[in-house]
Image (cartoon, coloured by chain):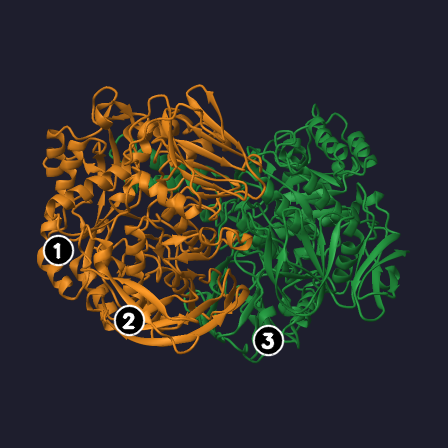
Chain colours: A orange, B green
Amino acid sequence: MIRKYTFGTPLPTGAAVLSLPAETSPLPWFDVSREGEKLRLTLALHPEERLFGLGESVRGINKRGFLYRSWNSDVFSHTESTESLYGSHNFLVFFSPERLFGIYLDDPGLVTWDLGYSRMDTAVITSENGQLDIYLLEENSLTETARAFRRLTGKSYLPPRWAFGYIQSRWGYASEKEIRTVADGHRKQGIPLDGICMDIDYMEAFRNFTWKKDAFPDLKRFCAEMKEEHIRLIPIIDAGIAAEEGYEPYDSGREADAFCRKADGSEFRAAVWPGFCCFPDFLRKDVRRWFGDLYRPLLEAGVEGFWNDMNEPALFYTEERTAAAFSRAEELRGGHADYEALWSLKDAFNGIANNPEDYRSFWQEPEGRRVRHDRVHNLYGAFMTHASAEGFRRFDPGKRFLLFSRSSFIGAHRSGGIWQGDNFSWWSHLKLALQMLPNLNLCGFLYSGCDLGGFGCNVTEDLLERFLQLGVFTPLMRNHSALHTRDQEVYRFSILDLMRNTIRVRYALLPFLYSEFMKAALTDGMYFRPLAFDYPEDPRAVATEDQLMLGEACMIAPVLEQNAAGRYMYLPEEMLMIRFRSPEDYDLLELPPGDHRISLSLGEFPLFVRKNHAVLLCPGGDSSETLNDHDFTALCLADRPVSYDLYRDDGTDPAPLLSEHLTRVSLAPADRVAKIHVVL
Amino acid sequence: MIRKYTFGTPLPTGAAVLSLPAETSPLPWFDVSREGEKLRLTLALHPEERLFGLGESVRGINKRGFLYRSWNSDVFSHTESTESLYGSHNFLVFFSPERLFGIYLDDPGLVTWDLGYSRMDTAVITSENGQLDIYLLEENSLTETARAFRRLTGKSYLPPRWAFGYIQSRWGYASEKEIRTVADGHRKQGIPLDGICMDIDYMEAFRNFTWKKDAFPDLKRFCAEMKEEHIRLIPIIDAGIAAEEGYEPYDSGREADAFCRKADGSEFRAAVWPGFCCFPDFLRKDVRRWFGDLYRPLLEAGVEGFWNDMNEPALFYTEERTAAAFSRAEELRGGHADYEALWSLKDAFNGIANNPEDYRSFWQEPEGRRVRHDRVHNLYGAFMTHASAEGFRRFDPGKRFLLFSRSSFIGAHRSGGIWQGDNFSWWSHLKLALQMLPNLNLCGFLYSGCDLGGFGCNVTEDLLERFLQLGVFTPLMRNHSALHTRDQEVYRFSILDLMRNTIRVRYALLPFLYSEFMKAALTDGMYFRPLAFDYPEDPRAVATEDQLMLGEACMIAPVLEQNAAGRYMYLPEEMLMIRFRSPEDYDLLELPPGDHRISLSLGEFPLFVRKNHAVLLCPGGDSSETLNDHDFTALCLADRPVSYDLYRDDGTDPAPLLSEHLTRVSLAPADRVAKIHVVL
């Protein structure tokens, strides 16, 4: 049951698709109080209570024991004490033997979640706006709670099938020639590849919707040539529009009055990559339409996928903030600046970017209301995503486009995927990526993945390999790295053979993983789940923090530590372990329920399958388009006949019907552990 | 066997106490090459080779897979990609089935250790100075290698026995009154306590060797009063001397020509807490003598312990660096600063502190040679430690003083302990603390521990409790936190009962842990060891990264993860597990060798004991001085009579003879798992 409780006059967020009447009774479970405008919800936690949700945030699958702030932030170097990441996902599920419910705060402003942080036994949730709808979801299971939340907020975005291929990316690829080198590097080494991301360097002066004419003399031709090699180009688009007269998007934006304004009516300007930019008011429908149509030249050149970036929005600096820091410097110059003064000056310069005052200095107009940006801050990236998706749909309603964004809010999961933000080449970020995935799924974001290898810092060979082993199973499988870091294309490493085989396993599994993804998306399910969702009665499963359920009947448990040649893991029930080294070389082991120590040398990674369920492997291939997906090897541990419903479609249908695309694979295993050839 | 290989004219470091002739044959194992002045050692690594050592550094017990730089650094916010920490310990042991040797680069300048970082299969060690002694240690076992290294570099520092008590610390305690509140807070709540650290706020204007007369009107009386309550005051001393005429240490330092000078002969000045400071040239014997005597007023007031800080040395700013940043600001002001210009300006301000150019701008005089500071940078803190210890010895040669330093170099382990540097309230730093400890021990630093609860960031209740559970076993058991973070004294928390019991277990174990420590120190052994040292033939033990051997026959395996109610662990042999909840409440479990999942709720933590060895528990007490250490409970798993040699002394003898202080405890257990009352 989903119930809505309205406090004051909520700001529109576009998150809910279900229109519910507001309850008149008080919100159950919580003590509700006001402190000025703030609304505060307080709840005593049960000792065994676990908290799932909050999508993109640091720390474990269980969110208990930290303070989170929903405030979309460009936080390149986040650690376990970072309170805000790139997206805000205000859905949290309370789960204990005593109770089960989910709460969604449909609030576009700052929400803080003190979840056993100040006191271990208390949760305190605070909305700064204090004007919001709160939805309470009470269902019979965790899985049903997740499903109900999707019912409330809408179906998850469907990417095209090629978006499940391996994607290579790097901040720095600046020309057709460089991109060709990357493509050739993969093809020559037999490393499968489906896409190459173009980061900001493809643009002319970092201006959205342009490209360097000398570096990309004929983008359409280049797109076509790459597509013949089954490689898609995936350009980046940033949120800000360079404020330069003569630059068409700026001129047309001004004409459409599309940009956010300050209180005095002037354009709000802040610098991002191209210098000073204006910021489209994506909360306005007409602005979204204008912006969505700006993608057209790239779409016409043949582009079928984009990533939207810097849309928290990230603000490098404004004139006001810069001037204030410079004035402070001027004050201190010459005189004796003590360490406190000097540190305050450092803070002034470091605090120029993404400054809260700047977010309070401009206004937006959601549904005709005039609202200061900070009150609706967390919607910005989400509505950029909507704008893009709407534009693609207008351009070609007959197919799916790839779209993933850095910033997000619940609701955006209907229009695009997200990557897990700018991360680092850290083992702790590999673990973080894993732990974040089920909570993203719970909040509707099924198409996701982290920057494999890490965006910032220099990767090591073993870390990249272990990242790839997680990436084999994430819908978005992208290797991405930042300018000035170590080159990260897999063909550059001494352990290329291991890496190639890991990526080849992704392609052997691609039809199966795609099937699992589509079935989850089309039935409002979760592709990745905490083990608690499948084994709610098993306290050990419920507490497991480094394994994930995948699809209908699989589980992953990657190695997350340096120099480890194996790991401990918990099996809630009997399962088959497939220990991959390559699509052709793997072990099949029948494992009883309980604790296990699994040996996993650097090139090895496991996939677990529940008894009487099957995994399908295809022979693989160099790209998703050249895969043979008729010829499968089914792997299972079974004591009876087994069937699997394989979802297959053309990979582009924007509104596929599940029932029309399922092929039943029936298996009659001769042995308990079986490997069966299937032709479909 | 220890062999010395000399390259060029080495700079003196004081690390070695053994005088060896230089070999004439080439250095075995490594390819040796020159690149300009740099000396480079290259070695192909065996696939299974593990690397132990490098003392204070990030990442795992096995140092393979990262690039480390020996360059003592004030790195408040270190992460897994931080290449340098506060100390430099250039000793590394290569261990594989094929070979075993240790290498020590006796080099006071920058040394980089690419240990399978660029290529997984290659180690490259580079000395920037290129003039150094390299010692090669080839012994029959890891343990013997460690012992040989102590033979080369000297015996480990012995702290007084009270230094094994619980110590409370916080940046911010500014008066007698505040310190009394902290003392009372512990005593009233029955939380044992032996010491309170006084951070910089006790000083008058942050000047070393002063104290605020209004806040501490009679330090001698206060010291005595606290000591009557069995609580020691432990003031901080920083490296820099405020450059103010009329301030005695500055005046006397100038008179003694004690301060480092720039090339032009002028005093090198950089700001630290008190503003501009001069930096004693600790590498000169006469300067050490002058500096060591400056502690006298505090010693005369009754102080028996100190911590030396900021001795990398940390430099907040110099006039030159500040002026350069301000000039850069001036250049950019007004004109259009693009993001690159602005970021370079940010870098300029952020880079004011600890700037490499500043370290190249002054000179020191080790043993009469004139050397630019950067060439001997890593010695600075170590020789401050020597200066202090020499001063204490002159003041009272008859007793041990507590001394622990932030910065260090090998050799300093003879004069003092170290804390593990400024850390954060992070779970990852709890794990880091554990992983660093055996490598510190290997390099001679036995008296050590981390800032329990974390110095920076706000701690959570569960994290502090888990930190304390590690702290129970670390020789230095100090709770320390930074100004502006959440108050961290244990009596402030809702789970105080758990925390109190954890600290009480420390006191029940104190005589035993002290005995283990002293035996390790006096026999050139290691108090904490990687499991590899005790089970070199067991590949699983060798690979264990989150358990430590402790003393003769114990092992620890603390919980290192949030929300975990247990953990996996590996037992290389049959052991007794003591699962503590308090000194009175614990479980005794006999565990077979192999993998285990141990249940450990928040208040529980384990100690493991090898078969036919015993652990002794005393009844505990409020301080180390009021402990009853005659009345023990011996715990063991045994199938034969068991004996334990308990080391006991007066806790202050500076040169105790091991054989004179051992009491043999003979036990005849009636059951396999036995709990035996012993009166000594």
Disc 3: which chain?
A: B
Name the amino acid type tagged 3: Leu
Q: Which residue is mark 3?
A: B100
B577 or B192, nearer to the observer:
B577
Q: Residue at x 39, y 51 (%)?
A: A437
Disc 2: which chain?
A: A
Q: Quadrant of residue B413?
A: bottom right
Determine whether label 2 and label 3 are within 8 Å by CB. no
Whether discs 2 and 1 lie on one chain: the answer is yes
B421 or B273, nearer to the observer:
B421
The secondary element bearing badge 2 is classed as loop
Whether discs 1 and 3 lie on one chain: the answer is no
**Label 2 Cα neighbours within 10 Å, binned few <14 / some 14-19 / many ≥20:** many
Residue A516 in the image: state x and y as whole percent: 32, 59
Q: Which residue is mark 2?
A: A618
**Mark sitting on residue A216:** 1
Residue B320 in the image: state x and y as whole percent: 44, 39
Q: Is residue A32 left or right of residue A492?
A: right
Foreground tag (2 vs 3)? 2
Foreground tag (2 vs 1)? 2
Determine whether label 1 and label 3 are within 8 Å by CB. no
In the image, residue B455 above or below residue A449: above
In the image, residue A415 above or below residue A261: below
Residue A215 in the image: state x and y as whole percent: 14, 55
